[in-house]
Image (cartoon, coloured by chain):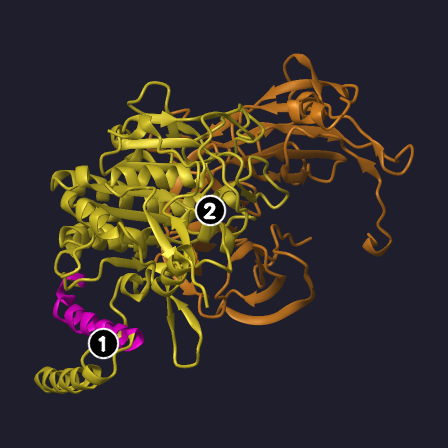
Chain colours: A orange, B yellow
């Protein structure tokens, strides 16, 4: 794939709120995107665009989340999509499901509402015609945890799920929340395998290919207060104890992390609004091997080895 | 030369209002005024105090006390109900929600200064920043009118990021005494030698300066001597700032943070008689990652502020201690493309508690997206009028800067009657 000659292929109109996570479903032409309201839409991208930048309508709406979608992951075969949300839950969606009923959604509802608001009318804005799409509604096959869905349950996250990773064999999920809880899940059964607490908010997690180690980047996002904290550690999953502390070499907010398929490399990306630095690290000793250039203009939000 | 009576009065007033230095530079007379002593005596009798919790950078009203769930401006936080029917606050302020009966939430602030330096100045003085008149901060005014001039402790103490105007025309006597962010005393308050030797040296200095002053009468010299005397008195009383013995038992309730420690110290200082303490909390200027910033901040704010209110009440101090929660601006209802909220002054929120304020109420209202005030707009002057009135200070007290009269609050400011107990 040559990104030097990248050009706009399609536009996916959807102005309900800002998009917070995107994932291609395996190697298919199916794309899922989640937004700030907890909505997820799925598009089937045509083989070739009719015209550059032409619009494509969604085919499916995944309903259930009630707050920001923080991460979307797909299995390699594209049959399963996993979503993490600020609503404290992780949901697994079986994408081969025929779905439920069909419904009509308006993709430019925000623009219409803003034009019809008093401020919009004062500014002389004219509401655009509704951009409607017929989509099939789908519910999650499994919901992992969630205080709101299971108020008295001790299972699952009690705060925003801020990070999510899937094991290489796709059997396990690792998730972290901003109360510092890190949970290892059995993806098929939806049960907790292990749980441990870190001091800060768990912002990036990654699982080693042998499922024995977990990288957790954490921070408490306070400025000028004694409560400020950041750390990057590799944990031994069996004992739920830190095995290697990389914090001294990475005194920054690490927003994304990924192990290479052979487990010999660990990629760490600096997050936030600073320049997006990308580092390759030897996970056996935490040694910084090199920094990849050029840097991203802003912080890195996701990393993947292909 | 013919001098008319009015010319004569104007000249006297001018001379009364100014000092001339050796270089001929005219300086202010630190707010010389005709009625301040009576006002101060009256206010001091009431023994009122004030703690200002300063949200530096500007906290978001939509993510704290004026939530808009389900609206495009709402954001990811969820509201929780309070004991006050129909009043909800953010889910990350659960302890403050329990104190709602003490709070007067003003949801209809409409102010004039949209940026940080001018907003900080304006919300500390109730006047627009001006090069012509150095207005005093709220703390300096309270220090002047509610403080005990004979006290060893300073009457205006602050820590963290706070105001930028100081005592203004009230002069150095009412300048804030600033602590380190951790609440520790500044390094220069530590003795550098044997305290008894220092005392003997101070006595000698006092004697020599006294002799010199007999032949050289000048306000700057007197001010300097006054400042020195106050410093020595402060050193005698500095144990009041030491919370090391009590903090271990309090830190779990207040939260083991700078702000938590600051709120605990504020309680101790008002107990010791300090009339004004300002504690700053950083990290609110969330043009990016507004929700991450606010979530982290509220987890610091909630235990500290609620514990402060509970402790003041338990000690019988809350009725006489006004606790003000505010920053220099609110934040935009629109969420920008960095998941942030920018500065907003058209419709935002401030919270008052104690000090004679009638709690358990919400004053003013914004529209469904929080973009405009629907009713009862409150200006900076109205807010300060309310604060001064409840603390027993005449909001129309007049000071002179040179010959120019300046009132404590701008013309047309009105105290909010509904909030006054």
Q: Classify residue A240 as left or right of residue A209.
A: left
Q: Provide the residue span drawn in magenta.
A: B219-241
Q: Classify residue A291 as left or right of residue A163.
A: right
- Label of residue B58 in the image: 2
User: Is label 2 in a helix, a strand or a loop?
Assistant: loop
Residue visible at 13% across and 61% down in the picture: B150
- x, y percent for residue B20: 39, 73
Q: Earlier in the sequence, mark 2 or mark 1?
A: 2
Q: Classify residue A7 as left or right of residue A263.
A: right
Residue visible at 80% across and 29% down in the picture: A56
Q: Is residue A9 above or below residue B21?
A: above
Q: Chain of mark 2?
A: B
Q: Which residue is mark 1?
A: B225
User: Does the segment drawn in magenta span residue B234?
Assistant: yes
- State the residue lying farthest toward the front: B2
Q: Residues within 10 Å of mark 1 (few under 14, many from 20)?
A: some
Q: Nearer the viewer, residue A197 or A255?
A: A255
User: Does the segment drawn in magenta span residue B377?
Assistant: no
Residue visible at 28% across and 42% down in the picture: B394
Query: Is residue B64 among the parts visible in the rendering?
Result: yes
Which SS does the magenta portion mostly show? helix
Q: Is residue B407 above or below residue B183?
A: above
Q: Nearer the viewer, residue B150 or B211?
A: B211
Numbered marks: total: 2
């Amino acid at each position: 794939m040559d990104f030097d000659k990248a050009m706009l292929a399609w536009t996916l109109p959807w102005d309900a709120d800002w998009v917070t996570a995107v994932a291609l479903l395996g190697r298919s032409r199916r794309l899922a995107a989640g937004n700030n309201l907890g909505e997820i839409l799925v598009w089937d991208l045509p083989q070739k665009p009719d015209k550059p930048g032409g619009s494509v309508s969604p085919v499916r709406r995944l309903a259930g989340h009630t707050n920001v979608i923080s991460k979307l992951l797909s299995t390699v075969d594209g049959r399963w999509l996993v979503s993490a949300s600020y609503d404290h839950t992780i949901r697994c969606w079986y994408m081969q499901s025929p779905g439920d009923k069909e419904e009509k959604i308006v993709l430019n509802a925000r623009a219409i509402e803003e034009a019809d608001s008093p401020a919009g009318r004062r500014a002389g804005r004219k509401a655009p015609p509704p951009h409607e799409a017929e989509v099939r509604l789908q519910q999650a096959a499994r919901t992992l945890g969630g205080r709101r869905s299971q108020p008295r349950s001790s299972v699952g996250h009690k705060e925003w799920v801020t990070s999510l990773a899937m094991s290489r064999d796709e059997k396990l999920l690792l998730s972290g929340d901003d109360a510092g809880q890190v949970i290892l899940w059995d993806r098929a059964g939806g049960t907790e395998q292990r749980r441990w607490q870190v001091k800060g908010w768990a912002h990036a997690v990654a699982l080693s290919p042998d499922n024995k180690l977990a990288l957790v980047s954490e921070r408490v996002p306070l400025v000028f207060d004694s409560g400020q904290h950041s750390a990057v550690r590799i944990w031994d999953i069996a004992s739920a104890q830190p095995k290697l502390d990389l914090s001294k070499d990475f005194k920054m907010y690490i927003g994304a992390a990924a192990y290479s398929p052979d487990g010999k490399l660990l990629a760490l990306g600096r997050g936030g609004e600073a320049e997006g630095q990308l580092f390759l690290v030897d996970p056996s000793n935490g040694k910084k091997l090199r920094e990849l250039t050029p840097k991203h203009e802003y912080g890195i939000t996701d990393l993947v080895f292909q | 030369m013919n001098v008319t009576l009015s010319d004569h009065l104007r000249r006297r007033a001018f001379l009364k209002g100014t000092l001339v230095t050796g270089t001929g530079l005219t300086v202010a007379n630190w707010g010389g005024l005709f009625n301040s002593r009576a006002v101060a005596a009256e206010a001091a009798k009431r023994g009122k105090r004030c703690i200002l919790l300063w949200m530096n950078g500007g906290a978001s009203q939509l993510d704290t006390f004026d939530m808009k769930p389900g609206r495009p401006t709402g954001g990811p936080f969820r509201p929780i109900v309070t004991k006050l029917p129909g009043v909800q606050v953010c889910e990350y302020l659960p302890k403050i929600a329990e104190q709602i009966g003490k709070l007067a939430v003003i949801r209809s602030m409409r102010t004039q200064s949209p940026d940080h330096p001018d907003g900080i100045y304006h919300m500390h003085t109730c006047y627009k920043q001006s090069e012509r008149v150095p207005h005093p901060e709220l703390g300096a005014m309270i220090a002047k009118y509610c403080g005990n001039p004979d006290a060893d402790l300073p009457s205006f103490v602050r820590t963290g990021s706070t105001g930028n105007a100081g005592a203004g025309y009230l002069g150095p006597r009412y300048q804030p005494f600033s602590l380190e962010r951790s609440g520790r005393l500044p390094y220069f308050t530590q003795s550098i030698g044997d305290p008894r030797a220092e005392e003997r040296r101070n006595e000698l200095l006092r004697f020599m300066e006294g002799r010199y002053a007999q032949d050289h009468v000048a306000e700057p010299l007197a001010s300097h001597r006054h400042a020195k005397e106050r410093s020595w008195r402060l050193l005698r009383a500095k144990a009041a700032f030491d919370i090391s013995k009590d903090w271990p038992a309090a830190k779990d309730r207040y939260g083991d943070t700078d702000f938590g420690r600051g709120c605990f110290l504020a309680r101790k200082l008002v107990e010791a008689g300090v009339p004004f303490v300002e504690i700053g909390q950083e990290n609110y200027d969330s043009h990016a990652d507004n929700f991450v910033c606010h979530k982290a901040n509220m987890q610091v704010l909630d235990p500290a502020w609620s514990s402060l209110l509970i402790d003041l009440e338990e000690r019988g101090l809350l009725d006489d201690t006004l606790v003000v929660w505010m920053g220099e601006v609110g934040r935009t209802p629109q969420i920008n493309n960095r998941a942030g909220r920018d500065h907003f002054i058209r419709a935002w929120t401030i919270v008052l508690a104690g000090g004679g304020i009638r709690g358990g109420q919400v004053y003013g209202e914004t529209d469904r997206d929080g973009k405009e005030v629907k009713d009862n707009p409150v200006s900076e002057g109205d807010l300060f009028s309310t604060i001064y009135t409840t603390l027993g200070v005449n909001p129309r007290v007049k000071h002179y800067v040179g010959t120019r009269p300046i009132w404590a609050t701008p013309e047309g400011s009105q105290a909010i009657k509904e909030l006054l107990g």
